[in-house]
Image (cartoon, helix red, strand yellow):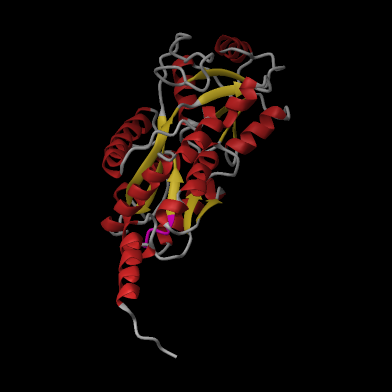
Amino acid sequence: MFHKMTNSNKVAVTVVASMMAFAPGVAAASPLSNDPIRLVIPFGPGGGSDITARVLSATAPEFCGPRIDVVSMSGAAGLEAVNFVRNAEPNGHTLLVTDYGPIVTSGFVDDVDWSHDDWQPVMNFTEWLPTVYTRPDHPIQTIDDWVTAATEEPATITFGHASPLGLVHLPLILFESVTGLENIHVPTSGGGETRSLIMGGHIDLGMTLPPSIASEVAAGELTALGIFSEERSPVLPDTPTFREAGYDVVLPAWLMIFATSDVPSETVEHLQDCFMEALASPTAVAMSDRVNAGIEPLNAADSTRLYQNTVENIGNILRDIGEID
């Protein structure tokens, strides 16, 4: 049975509709569908990328609408994840969360069917500072300890890292180039596996990011030797930079969210806005502080400039070390 709408009914409907028009995450105002958004990470679970992405996945649905899932794909040195996002429907529901390794470096050195221009940044999470660490009972406890040991017994120290020629590998190559040291490089699936191998005594040293080990360092379960950055990390304030130790190797990086270049600009803008609104929320700020993520987001325009500068800089470094012509 149908009932005639009274004037009071009409007023109520108008008020509700107006409220919905200004409510965050309302599907009618969004270019997104109700399907989940997938944040695809080219590393194994438990590392800095995973930790940081989960701050967003826990808080952004309120502002963006759809559920957000974090998906780890570490196969093919990260290219499994990159190609998965590249081949997904360009609707903004499948995004890549990565540092420069699997997207910038791979664009130079791997046989890929995409170029650096085929990606567009949505937002940058934070600056990342590559950090060398070990367990507290290891004979190497400082940068100088490492240099001395590697000088006395070349090619005997095992060093774990993910992403070949990426964020946690390229600084090691540059350091070896400057010092002439030789180490045994042990590729891993990501920060979580590297940390497990270190703590289990299976390898000597590792490279990761401060958020991945800050709690273990604070608890005395790991020792951070040094950081490849201009300044010390705020979450590891007692850990010196390599420059402080006399080695001029500085190579910080970033963690960005990327869409493919064929995702419509209005979709990218919507994702940027709702992601940044979510990360400014008290819940996200508290979560970021709790896991030492150090999230300081940049919008799409600023992230694009940073990405383009990184493409130029990493290209120059790879040419200098003979990886590309």
Report which quarter residue 252 is drawn in.
Answer: top left
**Is 92 contained in the magenta span?**
yes
Q: Nearer the viewer, residue 179 or 82?
A: 82
Residue 75 spot, x, y in % from top left: 56, 50
Residue 132 spot, x, y in % from top left: 55, 23
Q: Is residue 13 above or below residue 4?
A: above
Q: Quadrant of the C terminus?
A: top left
Q: Nearer the viewer, residue 176 or 91?
A: 91
Residue 137 spot, x, y in % from top left: 72, 17
Name the residue rendered at 33%, 66% in the picture: 17
Residue 308 shown left or right of residue 175 in the figure: left
Q: Is residue 320 above or below residue 5?
A: above
**Is 113 contained in the magenta span?**
no
Mark yes or no: residue 150 visible: yes
Residue 192 shown left or right of residue 16 in the figure: right
Q: Quadrant of the N terminus?
A: bottom left
Residue 173 shown left or right of residue 258 in the figure: right
